Each structure stands twice: as C-alpha cells, then as structure tokens.
Image (tube, rainbow, N blue to C red):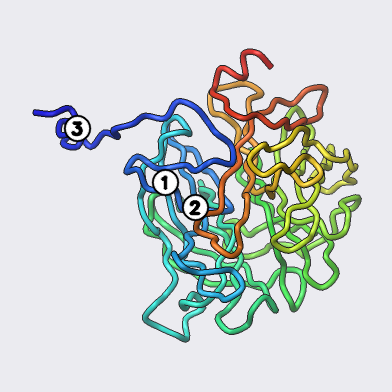
Amino acid sequence: MKLSSILAVLCLPLFVLTTFYPGQEWKDTNSNVINAHSAGIYYEKGFYYWYGEHKNPGSSESKGAADGGMHCYRSKDLLNWTDFGVVLPVDRENPTSDMAYGCIFQRPKVVYNPRTKTYVAYFKLYLKGDGYKICHVGVAMASKPTGPFAYHGKFLAASTAGTGDFALHQDASGDLYHFAVRKTDRLMVMAKMSPDYLQPATEYVVCPGITKNTEAPAILLKDGVYHLLGSGSSGWNPNQARYFTSSSLDGPWISQGNPCHGKNPANGLDSTKTFGGQSTFILPIQGADNQYIALFDDWKPSDPINSRYIWLPFRVKDKRISINWVDSWDMSWFKNH
C-alpha cells in the first residue's frame, strides 16, 4: 500500500506543519484554507480550540451575506488544525430568526462556565436588514467544546445602539467580564456577567484612560498587571495598534503607545499600520511561563474568505509587551527571546 493511502486510512495529514508564517496562507489538516476569522482560542485537556467567523465564498463585507456562523478547529500544537466545521451556523431556514442568513456575525469568543458546566459563546450580532446600525451581543451554548452550539439569545449592552468589538476576561474565581466599545460615544466600557454568563449582572461603566475609538480589544493578565491590546477605528483599513495597562480591571488604564515593531514584507505595511492587521486575541501557551501569541486579522473585505491570520510571539518584559514582526517562527523562538 502507498504511504498516502496508509495516511488516509489513519486519518493523518500528508503534511505536518512545523513553522508559523504570519500573514501567509494557512491550511488545515485536510489541506483546506482555514476559515475562522477574528479568532478566539480556548484550551482544554491538551487541545486548543480555534473559533472564528466562517466567511461564505464569493461574498464581500459591503454586499452582506458574508457570514456563515462560527467555525471550529482543534489542535495540539497550534500549527496543525483539524476541522470540526461550522458549530454555530446562521439560520438559512427561518428568515425571522435573530441568526437568519444575511445577519452580520462577528468576533466569536468561547469560555467554559465551571458553575453550569457549559461552553458559552459570545459574538457580535447585527440583525438581518439592519446593517451596522444596532449591535447586539449574541450568546450560544454547548455541552462540549466542538459543539454543536445552540443559540440562546441576545442582549443590548451599554446603550440602545449596543456595543461593538469586545473582549472577555475570566478571573481565577470563574467570574466573567465583558469589555466592549459603546456605539453611542465610542468609549470602552466594562460589566460583570451573571453567574450563568448569559447576561450582564452589573451596569456597564467606562474604562477610564482608554482612548476613545479603541476597537478590537484583547486582554492579558500577567503578574498583577492587565494588558489591553487594541486598534484605532478606521473601518476595514488597518491603523496603528494601541496598548494600555492597569493594575485593576476598574482602571485607571495608562496608554503605553504602540507595542508593535517591524514591517510585513508581504504587503509593505509597518507598525504604523499594525503590519496590515487588527488585534483579535492574546493567546497564552499552555504549560509555558511567559509565552504568548498575539493574534491579528489581515482583512480583505472584498474577498473576506481569503483574509489572512497574523500570529506573532512575544513575552512580557518589565511588565510591558512588545510585539515584533517575524517572517517565520516556531516554538524555539522563545528560547532566544
């Protein structure tokens, strides 16, 4: 029997990836391009789960119907990802559903609730036909990380127009906090979620010190310091990253300027344009001390399914983060930095 046939029988990939290539095409273990944009990563029992926006082929962000729901992939090494499909699809059968085909579904993130023993997905949800007018927080639940996830409902956070880009922070006690951009005044706000994670338990309060129009937040806690990475607001066009620190979730937050350095040779964009990307998540590498990956999306709004992923390694040094462009890297990068 040929080697390719043996591997197919064993359900093993023909090619095993060993190196990250930020901003380049990235395929799963079936040799299909990974379709999970605005990623959020969840880790459990030796596996990483990558959740992201499933983009429909042939669509564009401006014409609508680009979003197909939440796609899930699983990996042990963060490089080779097995496709588990769309685990929370938009609804193509019921045009009156909140999740009806034609809605805008963005930036899904999944956390595990130890109290209810459920996996809870949060996402931005613009109802079909509303455009970008009102942004709800959508919530879905599952009994296992690979789903399927069932849509639970939506809520409007912080204002009658809702909130935009968001980040979740889950503390050591299991309490969950929702950081989001308030659409009415473009300020970053925060609220604690209910014990079941399905709705806010407190009023949303402004995060003092975070610059107005900060989008795409991602949060990291390291040695008593909270680090919030974000972007400016320029639609689908890249801009300069923003970075804030605080000793408390309540603030005050202190601006630390632009943490990015270097240039993406593929598009010629440097740190003033965040290499062409926009932040979506900060990933701690499990079992390692002070090893992180900053996740960015290199958006292509006219062809969103082919938007690229920029994953860059970094450490926290002197209670600050610095994210440098690397053309290619593997886990040995951390031994030398």
Which residue shows up at 58% across the image and 78% down it? 127
Give the image quarter of residue 85.
Answer: bottom left
**Which residue is disc 1 drawn over?**
73
**Which residue is disc 2 drawn over?**
36
Instruction: Give the percent coordinates (x, y) of residue 308.
Output: 56, 48
Q: Kindly identify the amino acid type of the residue bearing the numbered disc 2.
A: Ala
Who comes first in sequence, dot 3 or dot 2?
3
Instruction: Tell me the SS state at disc 1.
Output: strand
How packed is label 1: few (under 14 Cα within 10 Å), some, or many (20 or more)?
many
Mark 2–mark 1 CB contact (< 8 Å) = yes
Mark 1–mark 3 CB contact (< 8 Å) = no
Which residue shows up at 60% across the image and 32% down it? 284
Instruction: Give the percent coordinates (x, y) of residue 266.
Output: 63, 40
Out of 237 and 52, give the one closest to the viewer: 237
Out of 107 and 34, give the one closest to the viewer: 34
Which residue shows up at 46% across the image and 67% down it? 58
